[in-house]
């Protein structure tokens, strides 16, 4: 009997993504973001999550997807990464999906570049593919140019 | 075997650790003064307490070790044995062994199987070597009443009665005899609980800020009264909770005599340690964070800094080196200095080493100034020790010291004089939790600037800004009291563009800040207000940005970043050695000239005349809305700080007497909505306001070129900042204006 896995799913540019349900702390509507100058472009800014300051990561940028157009404001998927809350900004929230472990396949060789480190693989759903994200990796941000310059 | 009541055991552990710390100190001080009976008795009592408790709890091995130590001590106490360094070493070894066993008990609940037989052997040997064999065990129980351990490291002694003063109980000097009285007034509290309290108070402060902002918007007297009360209570609570977390730095210094003794003995040196400012208090988190760096610095000073006794004698110094620890508050920061009177740092050797290690190029090395050279020792992978000892010289350490200190927002700096020793200065903030900050806006976002680095604020009107901000080959500067202040645009440093894309073309706001002792001006869009902010650390995604020290939640619930003034200055290239030296010269120069110069307030008077008054005749500068000017008899007045402030319009006061008439209006027509610039002066024990057109600046000038006064009310004319300026004689003006004063001084007091 294959094991069942649960994912919290969301959409980015029409694609279905998911992170392990156990990694997710909560899902909340859009909150005002304070931008962080000099940070990597992936960091959208800081949000006030009930008195806790949480970094918001623009998942579209993290995954090299074209920027969000139009008026629709993103949703926050707050995940726990290394004991810190991090918010992933997504277009739209999907359902909690339960899949069989053996419907998983690693990403094809043709998937290249930085994205490959973030996408663990896909689960084959009936009508579409569920991209599984590595939560830790998704929360990682390349060091900013400033830091690199100081260390050089 | 051990008692299974874990509460009793953990209590025992906590007490024993304190006792052991005290033993360390007492033994080292006893070594210096072996004849001190009181100290000996104290040591004896302490070890006896440990022995007694572990016997009670059934820790047999621990008891055996403590017992052996006690036997040896009893000989010392009875004067049958004289304390030698050898004995001290063994006794300290015993303390370490007990500590080890305690650590084992803490983790496993059992005593473990560490072998103590060697130690026991040595303790026995020493007993028999010096003493007559007829002293196997002096009965200790009669001599020492079971001392109640009451001093504490983590918890605090709460003195009853308002206001609740929280004091650390573990004063190093407290003789063990005096201890044992305060037990009923002390509560041992878990650090977790204190941390939780701190977080909650932080939240409370945020909620209070939000409420205050809201209550200012709503015109509701009772709401305002309640929120003011809440404000006061929250502030007091915050202060007290912060105090519970404060510990004197002596708590970590107390172990240094032992450290110094061990290190000095290990490398054959003689070192006397002195401490100043033991009682300086620091937040617990900071104390913990600097413990290791300080220990390292102390070991380093003994191992590298202080020379061998023979070398010292040859150099004309005393045999024993001197290590001085100093702690003091300065400008909202705590300074800790570790100085030795050793050989000092060797510039050439540092440079050579840095070159060998490839830490910098030969070209760079040649250009380095002294201070920069010394600070090379903080680079990773740097160590000049000729040989690696077990104490230091492995090239890890100094850079770790620096990173650890910087992690908590501090700075490290080293100064050295060849042949006379070196001083390492660590500067750290008092607390990390809640700080007062100035809130500014830049490109539509708010930023908080910690008030500790704030010197002053300068505002330039738009037209002034064009001429007042000058360029030194493209680098903007501002003449602040005749000294060039380097400027940085926050907007450029942060590389941000306003959200709506418009460029600000209003007045210029310069926030004058101090970074590492150097002033610089940071130009921001708007200056909002000062606020107590709760500092929250940045997450790891943005931690690497040196420009920000943290983030905070503002009154309206949005997030604002806290600027790291040092980081901003570094980014703007404000900090550099050349500038530093120039500045020192300037400071020295102005110091010398200060005696001849005095400060003046520059302003424009009627008809845009340049005028000045000596600053010491003024009490304050105020802006009073013209609408608040009232008439009282023949006099124009304004209500000011609960008093009636008579106003004198300088324009009228300076007019020729013959043309003077009673002015119907205090100000020119059409200026009813203006804000009056008022110089508040002290005049015969009361305050009088003199209105002027525009306040320009405060300058320091000798005003050597003088010309006699051309009209009444003027002292003389002088060239100030290249402008002929009239020096106004305020008392004469007020005299001529006929300002009423109370003949009877008591009447004035009643009114005031």
Image: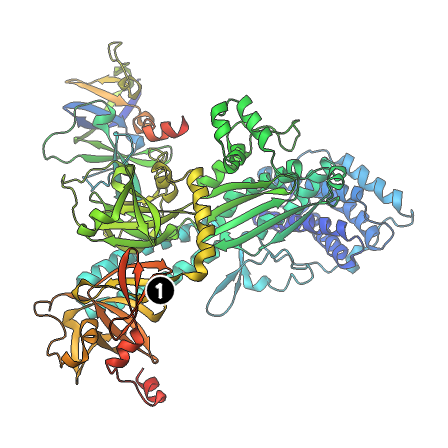
Front one among A22 and B134: B134
A32 vs B142: above or below: above
Residue appearing at x 84%, y 53% in the figure: B138
Q: For residue B423, what is the image quadrant?
A: top right
B702 vs B485: above or below: below
Q: Quadrant of the C terminus of chain B?
A: bottom left
Where is residue B592 shown, x and y percent of the image? 47, 55
Q: For residue B738, what is the image quadrant?
A: bottom left
Residue appearing at x 50%, y 61% in the figure: B166
Where is residue B458 shown, x and y percent of the image? 28, 54
Residue appearing at x 21%, y 21% in the figure: A130
Q: For this view, does A66 lie left or right of residue B303?
A: left
Label 1 sits on a secondary structure element that is helix
Q: Residue furthest bottom?
A: B744
Where is residue B556 shown, x and y percent of the image? 23, 52
Q: Is residue B4 visible?
A: no
Q: Quadrant of the N terminus of chain B?
A: top right
Q: For this view, does B134 lie left or right of residue B323?
A: right
Q: Residue furthest top?
A: A109
Q: Is residue B127 visible?
A: yes
Q: For this view, does A70 lie left or right of residue B104?
A: left
Q: Residue furthest front?
A: B707
Front one among A92 and B576: B576
Where is residue B235 shown, x and y percent of the image? 36, 61
Front one among B573 and B716: B716
- Subunit that carries the residue with mark 1: B
B342 vs B81: above or below: above
- Figure disc tally: 1
The residue that disc 1 covers is: B233
User: Around disc 1, counting alpha carbons within 10 Å, would you say few (fewer than 14), some (14 to 19), or many (20 or more)?
Assistant: few
B464 vs B693: above or below: above
Front one among B295 and B373: B373
């Amino acid at each position: 009997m294959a094991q069942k896995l649960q994912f919290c799913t969301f959409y980015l540019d029409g694609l279905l993504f998911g992170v392990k349900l156990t990694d997710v702390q909560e899902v909340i509507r859009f909150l005002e973001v304070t931008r962080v100058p000099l940070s990597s472009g992936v960091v959208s800014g800081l949000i006030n999550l009930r008195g806790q300051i949480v970094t918001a990561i623009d998942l579209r940028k993290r995954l090299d997807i074209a920027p969000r157009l139009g008026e629709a404001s993103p949703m926050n998927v707050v995940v726990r990464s290394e004991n810190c809350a991090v918010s992933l900004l997504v277009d739209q929230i999907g359902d909690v999906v339960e899949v069989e472990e053996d419907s998983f396949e690693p990403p094809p060789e043709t998937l290249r570049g930085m994205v490959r480190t973030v996408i663990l693989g896909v689960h084959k759903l009936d009508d579409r593919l569920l991209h599984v994200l590595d939560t830790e990796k998704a929360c990682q941000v390349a060091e900013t140019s400033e830091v690199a310059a100081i260390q050089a | 075997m051990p008692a299974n009541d874990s509460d009793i055991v953990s209590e025992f552990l906590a007490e024993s650790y304190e006792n052991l710390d005290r033993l360390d100190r007492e033994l080292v001080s006893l070594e210096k003064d072996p004849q001190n009976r009181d100290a000996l008795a104290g040591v004896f009592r302490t070890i006896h307490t440990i022995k007694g408790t572990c016997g009670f709890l059934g820790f047999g091995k621990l008891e055996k070790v403590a017992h052996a130590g006690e036997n040896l001590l009893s000989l010392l106490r009875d004067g049958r044995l004289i304390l030698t360094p050898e004995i001290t070493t063994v006794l300290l070894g015993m303390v370490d062994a007990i500590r080890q066993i305690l650590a084992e008990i803490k983790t496993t609940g059992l005593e473990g199987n560490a072998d103590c037989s060697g130690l026991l052997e040595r303790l026995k040997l020493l007993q028999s070597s010096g003493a007559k064999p007829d002293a196997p065990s002096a009965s200790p129980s009669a001599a020492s009443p079971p001392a109640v351990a009451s001093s504490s490291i983590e918890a605090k002694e709460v003195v009853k009665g308002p206001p609740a003063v929280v004091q650390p109980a573990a004063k190093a000097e407290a003789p063990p005899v005096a201890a044992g009285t305060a037990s009923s007034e002390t509560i041992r509290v878990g650090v977790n609980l204190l941390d939780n309290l701190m977080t909650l108070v932080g939240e409370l402060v945020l909620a209070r800020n939000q409420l205050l902002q809201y209550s200012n918007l709503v015109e509701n007297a009772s709401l305002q009264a309640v929120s003011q009360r809440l404000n006061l209570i929250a502030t007091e609570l915050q202060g007290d909770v912060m105090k519970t977390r404060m510990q004197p730095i002596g708590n970590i210094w107390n172990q240094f005599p032992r450290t110094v003794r061990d290190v000095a003995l290990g490398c054959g040196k003689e070192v006397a340690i002195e401490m100043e400012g033991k009682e300086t208090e620091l937040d617990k988190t900071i104390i913990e964070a600097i413990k290791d760096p300080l220990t390292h610095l102390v070991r380093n000073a003994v191992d590298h800094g202080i020379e061998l006794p023979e070398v010292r004698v040859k150099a004309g110094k005393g045999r024993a080196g001197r290590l001085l620890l100093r702690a003091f508050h300065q400008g909202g920061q705590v300074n800790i200095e570790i100085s030795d009177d050793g050989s000092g740092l060797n510039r050439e050797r540092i440079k050579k080493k840095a070159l060998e290690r490839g830490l910098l190029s030969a070209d760079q090395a040649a250009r380095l100034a002294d201070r920069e050279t010394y600070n090379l020792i903080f680079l990773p992978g740097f160590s000049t020790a000729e040989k690696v000892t077990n104490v230091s010289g492995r090239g890890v350490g100094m850079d770790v010291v620096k990173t650890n200190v910087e992690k908590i927002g501090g700075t490290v700096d080293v100064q050295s004089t060849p042949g006379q020793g070196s001083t390492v200065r660590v500067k750290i903030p008092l607390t990390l939790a809640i700080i007062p900050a100035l809130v500014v806006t830049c490109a539509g976002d708010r930023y908080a600037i910690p008030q500790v680095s704030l010197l002053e604020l300068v505002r330039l009107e738009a037209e002034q800004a064009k001429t007042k901000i000058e360029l030194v080959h493209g680098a903007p500067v501002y003449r602040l009291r005749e000294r060039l202040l380097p400027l940085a645009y926050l907007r450029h440093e942060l590389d941000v563009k306003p959200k709506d894309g418009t460029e600000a073309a209003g007045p210029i706001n310069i926030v004058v800040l101090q970074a590492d002792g150097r002033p610089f001006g940071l130009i921001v869009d708007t200056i909002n207000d000062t606020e107590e902010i709760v500092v929250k650390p940045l997450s790891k995604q943005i931690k690497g940005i040196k420009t920000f020290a943290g983030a905070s939640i503002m009154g309206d619930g949005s997030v604002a970043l806290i600027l790291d003034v040092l980081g901003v200055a570094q980014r703007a290239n404000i900090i550099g050695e050349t500038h530093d030296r120039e500045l020192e010269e300037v400071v020295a120069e102005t110091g010398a000239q200060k005696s001849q110069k005095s400060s003046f307030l520059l302003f424009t008077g009627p008809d845009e005349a340049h005028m000045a008054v000596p600053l010491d005749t003024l009490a304050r500068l105020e802006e009073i809305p013209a609408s608040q000017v009232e008439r009282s008899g023949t006099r124009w007045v304004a209500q000011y700080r609960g008093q009636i402030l008579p106003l004198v319009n300088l324009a009228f006061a300076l007019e020729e007497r013959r043309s003077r008439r009673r002015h119907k209006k205090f100000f020119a027509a059409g200026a009813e909505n203006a804000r009056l610039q008022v110089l508040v002066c002290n005049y015969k024990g009361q305050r009088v306001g003199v209105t002027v057109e525009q306040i320009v600046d405060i300058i320091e000038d000798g005003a050597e070129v003088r010309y006699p006064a051309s009209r009444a009310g003027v002292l003389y004319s002088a060239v100030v900042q290249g402008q002929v300026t009239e020096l106004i004689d305020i008392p004469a003006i007020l005299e001529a204006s006929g300002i009423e004063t109370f003949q009877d001084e008591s009447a004035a007091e009643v009114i005031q």
